Amino acid sequence: MHSPPIALLIAALPLPVLVVDMEGFVQAANPAARELFGLRIEGAQIRAHLRQPEMAVMLERVLGGQAEGCATFVTSSASRETMWQVIARAMPPGLIMLSLTDISDIEAAEAQRRDFVANVSHELRSPLTVLAGFIETLQGPAGADPAARTEFLAIMAEQATRMGGLVADLLSLSRVEAAEKIRPRTPVSIDMVLKATLAALRPQIDAAKMQLDYMVPADLPDIPGDYDQLVQVFHNLIENGVKYGATGGRLEIGAQKLAVLPGFDGPVLRVSIRDFGEGIDPIYIPRLTERFYRIDKARSRDSGGTGLGLAIVKHILSRHRGRLVIRSAIGEGASFEALLPCT
């Protein structure tokens, strides 16, 4: 029985695959490789197409007789940048097979993990440094000074509370992400969710001396949802409105049912939290739901923010198959709209 030609064998592979001779000329390319490199790749010199330094070194080693090699190669298009892992293996007689695997998502996830660990470490390091400094001070002469001790202990308690809030938000984010693919189905009244949230935040609203305009119809339909998570969504959004919109003196909470909305298959409940404070420059809006992203870091920390609130909101709404829409402009306050499907 005759073996099928190499071109037929690699044609069935979904990943881009090239077969080159020991001089580096491409002898065969499957459809995925031709789509990536162009129809003229067969017969071309592979060095001309894989010219990045790491790839060039690996190619020279394999073409020089090394049995196998591995390197990464990046391609760019108008819409995205793709990172490929290129594995080269010698195959008789005198040929080398190059297979390319798209590892962009893996690299992106790894970069996100590194950033997350770095951010958590940074967020915890600051209060820990403060606590360590005050503990050392209290162990010295300041321990005998009642006024200094009272002041330092108050600051230490504040920093401990900040760390506790960060850990709580991290655990909450982890739980939300773990259940994100499981859509909740229990009927939930948004009116009850908002009233429970406002009752919990009433001391903050009163302390900020904000006028509250509650414009939520009593006849809104129940939606499929997770009551506790939805309370968390609107707790974060209303609390943000109180913290950053206090200069406007007014907070507006509204809700309405929309029969149709682009991106949704059926009716949608739109719940808006609008403040009339300083507003947000639109250039910052796309990044507001990133973990630990803060426009004014000092102000956010002073107000007890962890930088995770809107990231949690985004993930909870995603679990409910909804989304968050943010609108704002400098001097015009900010509007945060939670869009939730009714069915």
Image (tube, grey):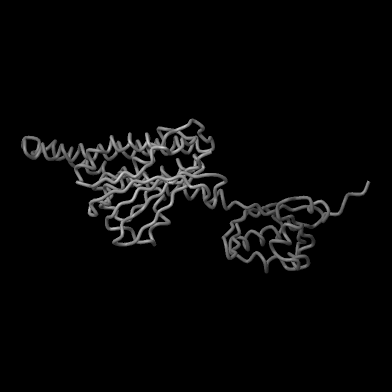
Q: Residue at x 89, y 49 (%)?
A: 3
State how many labels appear: 0
Q: Residue at x 57, y 46 (%)?
A: 265
Residue 167 in the image: above or below residue 294: above
Q: Nearer the viewer, residue 221 or 307?
A: 221
Residue 45, image quadrant = bottom right
Residue 157, image quadrant = top left
Q: Residue at x 81, y 51 (%)?
A: 9
Question: On the rendered structure, is 224 left or right of 275?
Answer: right
Residue 316 on image: x %, y %: 45, 40
Q: Nearer the viewer, residue 107 or 306?
A: 306
Residue 337 on image: x %, y %: 41, 49
Residue 135 on image: x %, y %: 18, 37
Residue 33, image quadrant = bottom right
* Residue farthest to the top, as pictured: 186
Q: Nearer the viewer, residue 136 or 196?
A: 196
Residue 298 in the image: above or below residue 228: below
Question: On the rendered structure, is 28 left or right of 317?
Answer: right
Residue 64 on image: x %, y %: 70, 60
